[in-house]
Structures are given as C-alpha cells and as structure tokens.
Image (tube, grey):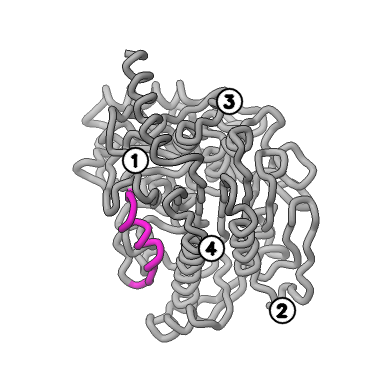
Amino acid sequence: MKKQWLLAGMMLLTSVCMAQKKPNIVFIMADDLGLGDLGCYGQQKIKTPHIDKLAAQGMKFNSFYCGTSVCAPSRSSLLTGQHTGHTYVRGNKEIQPEGQEPLGDSVQTFAQLLQQAGYTTGAFGKWGLGMVGTSGAPDRKGFDKFFGYNCQRQSHRYYPTHLWNNDQKVMLDGNDLAHKVTYAPELIQQQALAFIDENKDKPFFLYIPTVLPHAELAGPDDQFYKMYENAFEEKPHKGADYGPNASIGGYQSVEKPRATFAAMVSRMDAQVGEVVARLEKYGLLENTIIIFTSDNGPHREGGADPAFFNSSAGLRGVKRDLYEGGVRTSFIVQWKGIVKAGSTSKFIGAFWDVLPTLTQITQAPRARYTDGISFLPTLLGKGAQKQHDYLYWEFHEDGGRQAVRAGKWKAVRQKVKTDPNGPIELYDLAKDPEEKHNIAAENPSIVKLMDQRMKESHVESPIFPLIGAGK
C-alpha cells in the first residue's frame, strides 16, 4: 500500500512540475470571517465579488475546518501542520507589555520549509505567535519580511499607535483612542502589494493574515461604508469596554454597526481583488496558487451581528464554539490551468493539511512531523485522495472543550478542565448539519470511540494545560 501511495504521489508531482515551475503562493486569511459572510457561500446582504470570482475560477471546499475557534492556536495549527492536541500554541496567552506566548525554538513552520526550497517569504497583517526578539517572532519562523500587528491585542484597533516592520516599531503619528488618522489595514495592504512588486521575478510566498473584519467595528467614511450606510435597519449598539484590555483594544461605539461590518467585509474583498490585479499586471496568475480562508467562525464582539448576516451559514455556533459554526471555514483555491474552474470539493480537511500540501507542490523539505495529509490529488482532480480517519480540536477558554469529526459523526465535550471524562454530545451531520439533536444516548458505541479519539489526540502541554487543569 505504501508503494502505491508513493507512486501516486510521484505521478501527481510530475504532472504539476511539467505544467509549473516553482509556483508562487498567496495565502490570504481573514480574521473572524464567518463561513456565510461570502457570496459564494450564500451571503445575501454583503457584496464580495472578488472572492466570489476566486471561487468561480477555482475550487471551493465545503467541508474545510480551521485550526480551532480562536485566533492564536488556529494560526499555530496552520503554520505548524498540527492539530490543537499537538501544536505548540493552544490558546491566546498574553505576554506583557505586548505580544502572545511565542512559538518555541524547536517549532517548525511551513514558511521555514518554503524558505529552504528557495522561496522569498513575507507576512502582512496580524501575527500573534511571538513578540519581536522572541523565539516566535516572524523572522525566526520563516518570514523574510513582516509588516503589521505583532500583537493580536493591539490588532483590536484599526487606528493603532504603531505597527511593526520586521523588528522596527513604526509609529503612526496622530492615532490614539480618540483620533483616527491612519487606517492600518490600508497601510498593511500597500506593503503587501509592494512585496509582489519587489519579488515578481522569483518564487515567493505571500501570507496575508488580514485583521479584517475582526472587531472593533471601524473604518473610514469611504465608498465601502456609503454602499451600506442606509441599507439596513440598525440594531442599537452602546459600544463599551469588551474585556480587560480595553485601554489598548476597547471597541468603540459606532452609530451603524451593521453597515460598518458590511463595509469591512467588502473592503477586505476589494483588497483581495487588488492582490489578484497586481499578480495579473505581472503575468503571474498562471503560476500562482491563491488560497483564501478565515481563522475561525464569526465574532459577536463590538456590536457585530452574525445572526442578522447569517454569518455561520445556518450552522450552530460562532467564534469560541467547537460546533460547526465556530470551526468550519471558507476555503478557496485558485490555480489557473491546474485546478478546475468552478469546481467544489467535499474533502473533509483542516488547516493542518496545508503544510503537507504546499511542501509537496513546491518539493520543499518534508516536515519533521505533521497531523495533516496532502490534498493535492483533490486539487488536481486525479489520483487517489487519502482521507482523514477523523479531525480533532481543542479550545482552552470557558472551561475547555474538545471536539472530533469522523465522517458524518461530530462529538463535542464541554468543561474539560473540570471534568475530562464528562458527557459527550454526539451529532449526525448528514442528517443534522445544524447540530440540533444530541443522539449520544442512542449511540453508546460511537460515543465510546469518540472518547478514545479525544484521549489519543491530546498530548498535555505544560504551557497550555487542559485535562484536569481546573482541579
């Protein structure tokens, strides 16, 4: 069987190499964008023509999942190719005065592997995996160039006091809690486009973890806001202090939160269009893989209204939930001439599959370890696609949660920190995609199997303890 898989992989790789030489990679990841916030996934109220066009010209995945339902561990899962029972960062652990728990020295990212394969690498947006000068800083985890927010707490504000250019602090004069002068997403976008300009003649990996449309709700009074200014009946929003870091990232009151949110999504969509246009300008589209996704489900902070926009696409849950609405994400791949235009995939995959897929495509060195499998056969529409036995997630806030998806079955366990052997909820996604009917009592053998999979998937972390951590 191993020889068959190896032969199939070699044939797939040969077919790619015949058509392409070192394809560029552009990976765009939205922040807190729900599965249903895009037109191509059913959104009716917000216009996203550029991302919809990516789907029309590429492959749209309907059963793809993020690393988990909150920022830092989801990004750690993506970059390391490991699910949250194994990846180094498993929660949003703050480090003062600025930053989060850094990825360890020994942690390997696929950006580092791409560097070894001859790629110039750049990241533009939000990092959140280690402050400048630490083992988890972008320049120590595979990026030649970083520009944006190092700290996700700082990224709560769209008019911040500063950003980071590699290890240099860039002060944004005039911005403070009361004044809005420089809109950071636009400044970051210009740096991302400049990266394409500077590296158009050599293989590059462009990672754009945009902060849009993460709370706070904020943006300039421009064409995007005017598009929606009077489009919706507005829900009153008081605005306020949303958590302990309000002095840095407290969300400000906005008069029309629904219009503001819609404008932020459309602005992000337009920025995707600008990236595609820049690639097209240099004739790079035929040799560039463009991937679009989101780091987790939709948020409710700062006046956001995911119910009004159907941001979870009818699925149960939002950000921080391990139900489908918290972890199932948009995932679109455009690769002109290689990936069939207008295609869809039922492949059940997750962020930890990105690493083995991209390293196979680019012939980069293999990772020391990954929980992922390459979905290159799915992209090419040829060869045998290996499938996951199951997918696993952890969430370390609100008492801790675990979840498993195996085929049609979805299992969720709550309050793991106080009761690691607590009851498991079980859902049949084929019959009940909205996870309304807990059928654990009728399926004890499946529940037992899911319990085993939760136990075998979790390796305890001294930095992010989960099992029995609340005792």
Q: How crowded is mark 4: few (under 14 residues within 10 Å), some or many (20 or more)?
A: many
Question: What segment is highlighted magenta in the picture?
Answer: 45-60
> Which element carries disc 1, helix, strand or loop?
helix
* Residue 218, picture quadrant: bottom right
Q: In this view, does 136 lie to the left or right of 208?
A: right
Residue 351 lies in magenta, yes or no? no
Q: In this view, does 409 lie above or below 195?
A: above
**Nearest to viewer (mark 1 / mark 2):** 1
For residue 460, the mark is 3
Q: How many labels does the image show?
A: 4
Q: Residues within 10 Å of mark 2 (few under 14, many from 20)?
A: few
Q: Residues within 10 Å of mark 1 (few under 14, many from 20)?
A: many
Above/below status of 48 relative to 105: below
Q: Which mark is residue 179?
A: 2
Instruction: Provide the secondary structure element on which disc 3 rests.
Output: loop
Q: Which of 113 and 141 is in front in this view?
A: 113
Gap between marks 1 and 2 measured at Cα: 47 Å
Where residue 12 sits: x, y (%)? 36, 30
Amino acid type assigned to the residue bearing label 2 in the image: His
Label 3 or label 1, whichever comes before in sequence order: 1
What residue do we see at 45% from left, 21% from top?
Answer: 456
| Image mark for residue 212 | 4
Residue 379: numbered disc? 1
Please tell me whether mark 4 or mark 1 is closer to you in this view. 1
Quadrant where the N terminus sits is top left
